[in-house]
């Protein structure tokens, strides 16, 4: 009995010892947690609510374009990668987003400008050559994009060259290519066709354009006999505001049935002949809208090729009059020829000073 009582007493002592040690461990743990936490200032309920409201206001909706800090993040990242000379990262950002051709031309221009600045600096390294290689790589990408778009749709490719880029200071791909001196891009067939159409304006001339223009300048009634492009053929060429208003007036004046423009004699002849060729010709004539006389004169004198030849003829006339005035003895009062020479010189000086 004594042994059994001693055993039970020792077991109770052991259990009580374990319980005390566990209590001490819990107290130490709680004390450690309280001392390990940082000191927090006492806040009232109103400040907590205002903080929550601020956090809600600071949340930016990514899907909403107006609340985003960067409307086109890939454009900014591309420019940053180019300026930091990280070509692989710039090529990666170039693949995403819109306006790939414009981004390639901008990267080409930036690398070319950085290469020029590296050449002008006193530091001797291979940075200039490296920047030129980067510029050529982006230029090749722009040319390949132009070639692919030109094969798919020629008209849309030409519109792509003259489209105003709102994200790049309202510039155009053609202006960016010229400013970056990307000759393969400017020498492309699509670019050359666009430049030739812009040079001719609304005049539809294929052969002997210089002869027709000079004849029309010397004989103004010949302007009515020239062929002009339609509004659909001029859709890919950028127009000024005045030209746009003239086109609107033209569309309003031609808003009537095309059968009224066909005289009865032509209809009778077509019915008598009854051949498919004559029918097709009459249909084409009926579909072509009539251009007003005032718009013909405006389109003629507004064409760049006409301005060039008009300026050339005016300069040749000035040289002949100037030679006549210098070689021939004149009266005390200036003659008509002298007044023409004086006015030409005065207007030329104003043009140069402007």
Image: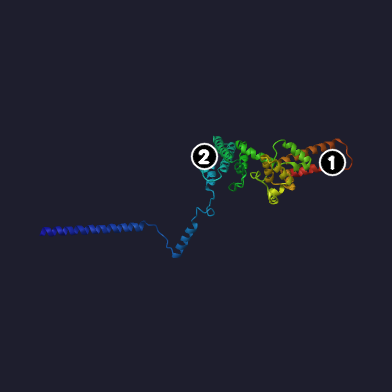
Q: Is residue 30 visible?
A: yes
Residue 247 position within the rendered picture, expressed as x and y whole percent measured from the top left: 69, 49
Q: Is residue 352 left or right of residue 133?
A: right
Q: Quadrant of residue 331?
A: top right
Earlier sequence position, callout 1 versus callout 2: 2
Tally the marks: 2
Q: Which residue is mark 2?
A: 87
Q: Quadrant of the N terminus?
A: bottom left
Residue 279 position within the rendered picture, expressed as x and y whole percent measured from the top left: 67, 42
At label 1, counting other C-alpha atoms closer than 10 Å, the crowd grade (few under 14, some 14-19, many 20 or more) is: some
Q: Is residue 20 left or right of residue 109?
A: left
Looking at this rendering, what residue extends furthest in the front direction?
272
Residue 165 position within the rendered picture, expressed as x and y whole percent measured from the top left: 60, 46
Residue 274 position within the rendered picture, expressed as x and y whole percent measured from the top left: 68, 41
Q: Quadrant of residue 195?
A: top right
- Residue 327 sits above or below residue 54 on the image: above
Label 2: which secondary element: helix
Q: Is residue 354 visible?
A: no
At label 2, counting other C-alpha atoms closer than 10 Å, the crowd grade (few under 14, some 14-19, many 20 or more) is: many
Q: Quadrant of the C terminus?
A: top right
**Front-most of 170 and 133?**
170
Q: Is residue 194 left or right of residue 314?
A: left
Looking at this rendering, what residue extends furthest in the right direction?
331
**Front-most of 11 and 324?**
324
**Residue located at (12% from left, 58% from top):** 4
Q: CA distance from mark 1 to mark 2?
A: 64 Å
**Front-most of 198 and 331?**
198
Label 1: which secondary element: helix
Q: Which residue is mark 1?
A: 338
């Amino acid at each position: 009995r004594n042994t059994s009582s001693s055993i039970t007493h020792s077991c109770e002592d052991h259990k009580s010892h374990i319980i005390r040690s566990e209590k001490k461990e819990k107290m130490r743990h709680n004390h450690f947690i309280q001392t390990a936490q940082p000191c927090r200032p006492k806040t009232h309920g109103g400040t907590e609510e205002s903080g929550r409201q601020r956090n809600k206001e600071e949340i930016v909706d990514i899907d909403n374009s107006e609340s985003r800090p960067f409307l086109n993040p890939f454009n900014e990242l591309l420019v940053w990668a180019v300026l930091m000379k990280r070509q692989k990262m710039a090529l990666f950002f170039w693949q995403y987003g819109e306006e790939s051709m414009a981004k390639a031309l901008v990267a080409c221009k930036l690398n070319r400008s950085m290469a020029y600045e590296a050449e002008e600096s006193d530091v001797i390294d291979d940075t200039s050559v490296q920047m030129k290689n980067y510029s050529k790589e982006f230029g090749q990408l722009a040319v390949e994009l132009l070639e692919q778009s030109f094969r798919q749709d020629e008209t849309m490719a030409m519109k792509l060259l003259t489209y105003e880029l709102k994200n790049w200071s309202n510039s155009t791909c053609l202006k960016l290519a010229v400013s970056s001196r990307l000759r393969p891009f400017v020498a492309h067939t699509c670019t050359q066709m666009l430049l030739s159409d812009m040079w001719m304006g609304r005049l539809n001339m294929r052969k002997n354009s210089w002869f027709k223009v000079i004849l029309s300048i010397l004989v103004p009634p010949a302007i009515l006999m020239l062929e002009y492009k339609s509004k659909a053929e001029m859709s890919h060429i950028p127009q000024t505001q005045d030209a746009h208003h003239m086109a609107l007036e033209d569309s309003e004046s031609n808003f009537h049935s095309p059968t009224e423009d066909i005289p009865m004699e032509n209809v009778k002849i077509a019915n008598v002949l009854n051949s498919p060729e004559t029918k097709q010709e009459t249909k084409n004539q009926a579909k072509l809208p009539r251009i007003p006389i005032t718009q013909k004169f405006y389109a003629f004198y507004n064409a760049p090729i006409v301005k060039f030849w008009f300026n050339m003829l005016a300069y040749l006339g000035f040289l002949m009059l100037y030679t006549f005035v210098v070689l021939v003895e004149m009266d005390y009062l200036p003659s008509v020829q002298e007044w023409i020479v004086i006015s030409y010189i005065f207007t030329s000086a104003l043009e140069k000073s402007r």
